[in-house]
Image (cartoon, grey):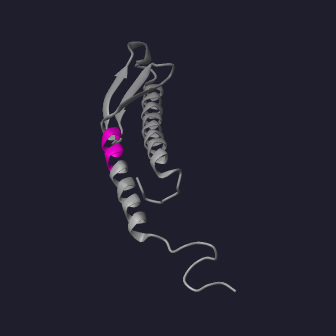
Amino acid sequence: MARKGGFPGMGKPNMGSMMKQVQKMQRQMEQTQAELEEKVLETGAGGGAVSVKITGKKEIVGIEIKPEAIDPDDIEMLQDLIMAAVNEAIRAAEDMMASEMGKITGKMNIPGLF
């Protein structure tokens, strides 16, 4: 017969200890997020013809276009390269944030966490 107020074989959970652990994790996450937001990643497209620098906040801080990527008769190609490089930069920033936060949360899936 199960006892009331808990699971068989387990003592009462220590809510104070759990809250301290959650608060510690929250502080670690805030600190890590602040650090990651300052990091700058660089990605590229077209074999490096277009490169984009992005912060962990997903703010573009630089775009470099090599002269050979500029063809006045094919502006669409340059536009596609820029779009591809920006999209790759955004993915890289998101992956960096998810990876580092996952280290803190132990891979817990908490929607809207970051």
Considering every residue shown, the one lying at the far right of the view is 1
Is 95 left or right of 26, judged from the image as shown?
right
Chief secondary structure of the magenta portion: helix
Q: Which residues are magenta?
A: 30-36
Quarter containing the N terminus:
bottom right
Displayed quadrant of residue 2? bottom right
Q: What residue is at 48 percent from the left and 41 percent from the top? A: 95
Instruction: Depth check: give the residue in front, 106 or 55.
Output: 106
- Is residue 48 shown above or below 99? above
Residue 38, percent across and down? Answer: 30, 36
Displayed quadrant of residue 41? top left
Residue 34, percent across and down? Answer: 30, 43
Residue 35, percent across and down? Answer: 32, 39
Q: What residue is at 40 percent from the left and 19 percent from the top? A: 72
Instruction: Depth check: give the residue in front, 10 or 18.
Output: 10
Residue 105, percent across and down? Answer: 47, 52
Considering every residue shown, the one lying at the far top of the view is 68
Total marks shown come to 0
- Is residue 77 shown above or below 9? above
Displayed quadrant of residue 23? bottom left
Q: What residue is at 36 percent from the left and 54 percent from the top? A: 24
Asked if the stretch drawn in magenta spans residue 103, the answer is no
Is 64 left or right of 5, judged from the image as shown?
left
Instruction: Depth check: give the residue in front, 58 or 36.
Output: 36
Is 68 left or right of 47, judged from the image as shown?
left
